[in-house]
């Protein structure tokens, strides 16, 4: 990651400038998930400076093969079932929507199509992310494929919502006759399909950003089907064609905030923002509360993808055990992965940037 690479470069430059002898063992992320790595990483990465405190890096992974294991356990069969049910809904809604002239039904079919597309991209992303090994060019593999797919799906949802609103305005100016009975029947079918898809995918909603996004879409589609059912009944019983337009716009309005929220979540991951489930101020306070820690800097927490939060920090301390304690705090209390902790003595920190503690 860029933040981590920058930190390492600056530290190596500092070491060279002060003529320290440094023995650094490269860390291969494709082989780093080895049991009992804690002690090895603590010893191997220590750098002798003739001081009481060893100066160096500590990389540790509490999740053996976390990248592949988590994705491998994502319930792909659930997604496949939801895709099949979604395709039945989409095809039925498009055919009947065109024949009946129902904008609400077409609106719901467009939304259902984005659900199916989102599920398909989720399935592809999960399989790619789980099977693709790390390479020299992609040291974390392709875990973020699912994040990009979720972003594309959010943009597609926004586009569909805008198209529906534009078409609704056109129909307000030039009303179209709508057949209420077929709309009502298809709405019932769509509601059943969405309900079964909802049950199928619910179990995997917390394991992937894409599955979560698709889960929310299917749930919203159930609401859309209820709306279409109501509009169909109103149109069939009263002949008021504007009910169809109202429901179509309501579905679009329902989609917009969800799409924006998903897009913001994707943006936060891609821009390496702080995960929403990590309290940085609390973590900072807890690190500074570790015995012997006098200051910290180069403090970063970001997400590789859903549930895979990464942390790194430099701490200024004279306590040889501080690095291990900080690392355990970040891993076990804050559930961070790929944790990197580097220690510096107050003298080294003072010589590095003039900040003396």
Image: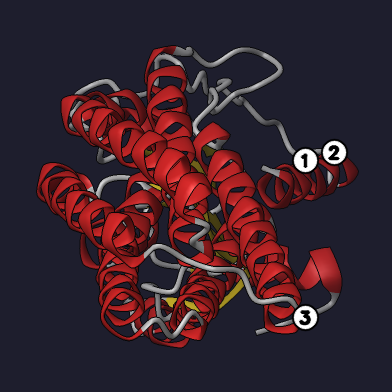
User: Which residue is under mark 3?
Assistant: 355
Mark 3 vs mark 1, CA separation in Å: 18 Å
Q: Position of residue 153 (x, y in %)?
A: 57, 48
Category of crowding for the residue at label 1, using alpha-carbon neighbours closer than 10 angstroms: few (below 14), some (14–19), many (at least 20): few
Disc 3 and disc 1 in contact, CB within 8 angstroms: no
At mark 1, the secondary structure is: helix
Instruction: Tell me the quadrant of the picture where the C terminus can be found.
Output: bottom right
The quarter of the picture where the N terminus appears is top right
Closest to the observer, 14 or 150: 150
The reply to whether residue 106 is visible in this rendering is yes
How many labels were placed on the picture? Answer: 3
Residue depicted at x 61% and y 69%: 176
For disc 1, the marked residue is 12
Q: Residue at x 62, y 66 (%)?
A: 161
Whichever of callouts 3 and 2 sits on the residue coming sooner in the sequence is 2
Residue 337: x, y in percent?
A: 37, 47
How is the rendered protein coloured? secondary structure
Q: For this rendering, which residue is in front, 54 or 336? A: 336
Q: Is residue 118 above or below residue 346?
A: above
- The residues tagged by marks 1 and 2 sit, at their Cα atoms, a distance apart of 6 Å
Q: Position of residue 323 (x, y in %)?
A: 39, 57
Q: CA distance from mark 3 to mark 2?
A: 19 Å
Mark 1 or mark 3, which is nearer the start of the sequence? 1
Task: Return the residue at label 2.
Answer: 16
Mark 2 Cα-neighbour bin, 10 Å: few <14, some 14–19, many ≥20: few
Local SS, label 2 = helix
- CB of mark 1 within 8 Å of CB of mark 2? yes
Badge 3: residue crowd in 10 Å (few <14, some 14–19, many ≥20): few
Question: In the picture provided, is 214 more to the left or to the right than 349?
Answer: left
């Amino acid at each position: 990651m860029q933040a981590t690479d920058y930190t390492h470069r600056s530290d190596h430059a500092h070491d060279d400038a002060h003529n320290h002898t440094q023995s650094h063992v490269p860390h291969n992320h494709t082989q780093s998930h080895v049991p009992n790595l804690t002690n090895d990483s603590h010893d191997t990465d220590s750098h002798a400076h003739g001081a009481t405190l060893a100066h160096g890096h500590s990389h540790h992974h509490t999740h053996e093969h976390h990248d592949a294991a988590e994705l491998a356990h994502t319930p792909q069969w659930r997604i496949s079932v939801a895709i099949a049910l979604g395709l039945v809904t989409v095809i039925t809604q498009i055919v009947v929507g065109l024949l009946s002239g129902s904008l609400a039904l077409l609106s719901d079919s467009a939304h259902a199509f984005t659900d199916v597309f989102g599920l398909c991209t989720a399935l592809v992303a999960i399989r790619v992310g789980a099977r693709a090994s790390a390479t020299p060019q992609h040291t974390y593999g392709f875990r973020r494929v699912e994040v990009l797919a979720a972003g594309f799906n959010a943009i597609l949802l926004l586009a569909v919502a805008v198209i529906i609103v534009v078409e609704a305005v056109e129909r307000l100016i030039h009303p179209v006759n709508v057949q209420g009975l077929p709309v009502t029947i298809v709405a019932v079918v769509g509601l059943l399909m969405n309900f079964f898809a909802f049950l199928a995918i619910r179990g995997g909603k917390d394991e992937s950003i894409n599955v979560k996004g698709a889960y929310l879409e299917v749930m919203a589609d159930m609401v859309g089907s209820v709306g279409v059912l109501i509009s169909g009944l109103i149109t069939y019983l009263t002949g008021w064609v504007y009910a169809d337009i109202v429901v179509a716009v309501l579905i679009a309005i329902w989609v917009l905030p969800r799409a924006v929220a998903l897009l913001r979540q994707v943006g936060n991951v891609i821009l390496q923002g702080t995960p929403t489930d990590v309290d940085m101020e609390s973590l900072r306070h807890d690190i500074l509360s570790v015995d012997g820690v006098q200051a910290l800097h180069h403090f970063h927490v970001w997400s590789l993808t859903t549930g895979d939060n990464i942390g790194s920090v430099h701490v200024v301390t004279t306590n040889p055990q501080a690095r291990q304690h900080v690392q355990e705090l970040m891993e076990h209390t804050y559930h961070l992965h790929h944790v990197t902790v580097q220690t510096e003595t107050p003298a080294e920190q003072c010589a590095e940037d003039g900040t003396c503690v």
